[in-house]
Amino acid sequence: MRRHAFIALQSTTVRQPTTVLMRRRRFLAVAGAAASAAFPAYAQPAGATRHIAVLLGAAESDQIGQSGIRKFREALRELNWIEGRNLRIDLRWGGGDLARIRVQAAELVSLAPEVLFSTNTPPTRALQQATRTIPIVFAVVSDPVGDGFVASLSKPGGNITGFSNMDAAMAGKWMQLLKEITPDLQRIAVIYNPETAPHSVFLPALEAAAALLGVTLVRAAVREPAAIDATIAALAGNASLAVMPDVFTTLNRTAIIAAAARHRVPAVYPFAYLAVEGGLLSYGPDSADQYWRAAAYVDRVLKGAKPADLPVQAPAKFDFVVNLKTARAQGIALPPTILAAADEVIE
């Protein structure tokens, strides 16, 4: 059974929660060993400066996006790709603006880089539409097969490969957590932007989970930031909220977290940093880890590997974070099993 698919939270022994922002650091040693095994060492190429281009879904002002690109650059440096010495990087920030992203994709392709690196679905789609020849490595993409980026996860088959950050089965985990903290509630809403979210992969899984849990799923689609507060306010007192992973919800996370707190709507989020920033619960992959791992694929492509031969990689690390401070502020008594299962409890 995969760790993220309907994991039972019941336990006969209650573990003590961790202290504020103290995470179990089981990842570092494992990731280092895994990276060495998965990506064998190559001789560092000599000669002319190599050229890659990067198109990110986040805004330049977004600290999570900045943290991710730092991880990407750090990983490249560990692979002996040094900007200003043997590597040039052209970087663009999409800011969740679809029209802007399409223009930036065309611009980057016109620069003829040797490899393109993208994050999130809209930038990856824009680059795919702009080139079918330049290799593309993506990260933080939820449904690469359903979105038509690759033929299959094991055999991508074209000029694109990378790192998927989600599995539809995670939707069941989100629903299970909400049902456990609000057992009498009969409605769970999911908020997403239908223009940017991977709803085609998550909505069927959410519907299936709702049926198993005996709740009704409400589709709370939003296209503009101005609609966030009213959408969440309508859920107050009669529904919980699941926040779909999406460049829109990421860029507007402050408004979503604030509205959920203001209207006392229990909410679960797909990334740990959303709970750290004030969300009630989060369960999902470590997105920064995807940036780090993507650098190894960029390295392999620069050394001659073809995207068609590099399988799409699944998330390697998942985090379950509980913000006890938010729970207290919203008057939510979290079950001991929730606290015991958390990787991190924010006091």
Image: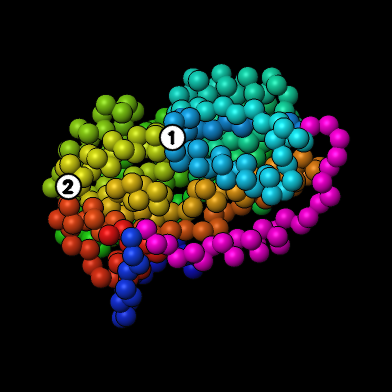
Count neighbours of disc 2 (C-alpha within 10 A) and say few if under 14, some if 14 to 19, many if 20 or more.
Answer: many
Residue position marked by numbered label 1 in the rendering: 62
Q: Is residue 60 above or below residue 171?
A: above
Using the image, tell me which numbered label, if any, was put on residue 113.
Answer: none
Q: Eyeballing the image, is 346 above or below 221? A: below
Residue 293 at what x, y percent from top left? 62, 50
- What segment is highlighted magenta in the picture? 21-49
Within-10-Å neighbours for mark 1: few <14, some 14–19, many 20+: few
Identity of the amino acid at label 2?
A: Arg
Residue drawn where x is 47% and y is 53% of the image:
285
| Left or right: 160, with 186 as reference point | right
Q: Is residue 275 left or right of residue 328?
A: right
Q: Position of residue 119 (x, y in %)?
A: 55, 37
Q: Quadrant of the C terminus?
A: bottom left
Q: Quadrant of residue 169?
A: bottom left
Q: Residue at x 49, y 68 (%)?
A: 1
**Residue at horizontal 50%, vertical 38%?**
66
Taking the image as drawn, is residue 292 in sight? yes
Is residue 215 a member of the stretch shown in magenta? no
Query: Tag 2, which secondary structure?
Result: loop
Residue to which mark 2 is pinned? 264
